[in-house]
Image (tube, grey):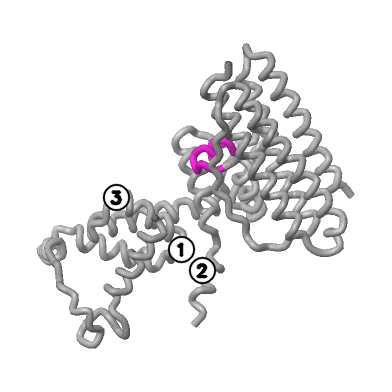
Amino acid sequence: MATPEQMQALNELFAEEIEAAIRYLHLAVTVKGLDRLLVQKVLLANMRETIEHAQTIANKIVQLGGVPSLELRLSLAPRKASGAEAIRTALAFEHAALDAYRELLDTIHDDVPLEEFIRKQVEVEAQHAAELSLLLEE
Amino acid sequence: MDFWKAFDQNPITHSAAHHVVAIADLIDAFGYARVSDVARLLRITRGSVSVTLKSLKQRGLVIEDERRLLGLSAQGRRIAQGIRARKQILIRLFVDVLGVEAEQAGIDTCKIEHLVSAGTAGRVLRLLRFVKSAAPEAQRFLAAFAHFEGACTHDPATCPCCDEVCLADALAAIEESELRDDD
């Protein structure tokens, strides 16, 4: 059984994922120049994957007896970005989500299924961030 | 006059101002600040904090050490101190002089604390020093103001405060529209 703190952390992760999906969409439509041809596809693919992550987290909350809650305060400036800028911004929020998963993992000591679930999410998120980092390499 | 452009040229956005002050507050309270602490304090996601910090780090206002603890550069600290000082000055004005409720004063100052120029804040501070001094004129002013009800004639032609429109009517219209928005 998840503790109230763990449930709160899961809800925070749900918000991280939903917000990240919105950010991916915004970045995808605001990316400019020739980069748009390639980077937009990557950003939209990540958006879809991030929505799946949000759904996975929400399902986990329900399985643990909770009800997903969502509180977002998001304002996205109408600013165009180059492909590299968009990827760097995406990396910033991907790393933040990864840290959030890792922090939750550190708090789980006696719940093997939850620990395994979060460990798997860490792996997926780490892979996500690594793929984005590769795009920035010269 | 393009006064509205000055808003865009402000050295720090509303959101960025909150982040800088949050880092300063956390460091003062706990000796350290992490992205997760800032996110919880501001009640936003870590992703939001990280994206804002990315630009504040690029501008040299926020620093992050190898343990990923956040700090403020000398310029960042100056900005945080300036915002805190302006907030305090404006809260004193709103609460102590104008009689605004503390909670509303907190909400309203939050919207302008990073936008008011140091020069204007200095003038407000001068006014505060006067009205809070022991000078009999200041005491009389505060007492008279507290009981002043000054009925509005709603006639800009005879009003010493209004030019073309009745400002009291304009404020009433704003309040009415805010109430409608709340519904």
**At label 2, which amino acid type do we have?**
Phe
Residue highlighted by disc 1:
B115
Amino acid type, residue under disc 3 in the picture: Ala
Q: Are marks 2 and 3 in contact (CB under 8 Å)?
A: no
Going by the image, does B67 lie left or right of B155? right
Q: In which quarter of the image is the N terminus of chain A?
A: top right
Q: Which residue is drawn at 49% across and 44% down?
A: B22
Q: At which x and y percent is residue A18? A: 65, 42
Residue B5's place in the image compared with A121, above or below, is below
The reply to whether discs 1 and 2 touch (Cβ–Cβ < 8 Å) is yes
Q: Does the magenta stretch mainly form a helix, a strand or a loop?
A: helix
Q: Is residue B74 magenta?
A: no
Q: Mark 3 points at which residue?
A: B102
> Which segment did they paint magenta?
B34-44
| Residue lying farthest to the front in this orientation | B183
**Residue B7: assigned label:** 2
Q: What element carries label 3?
A: helix
Q: Position of residue B106 (x, y in %)?
A: 36, 51
First-in-chain label (3 vs 1): 3
SS label for mark 2: helix
Q: Where residue B182 sits: x, y (%)? A: 39, 55
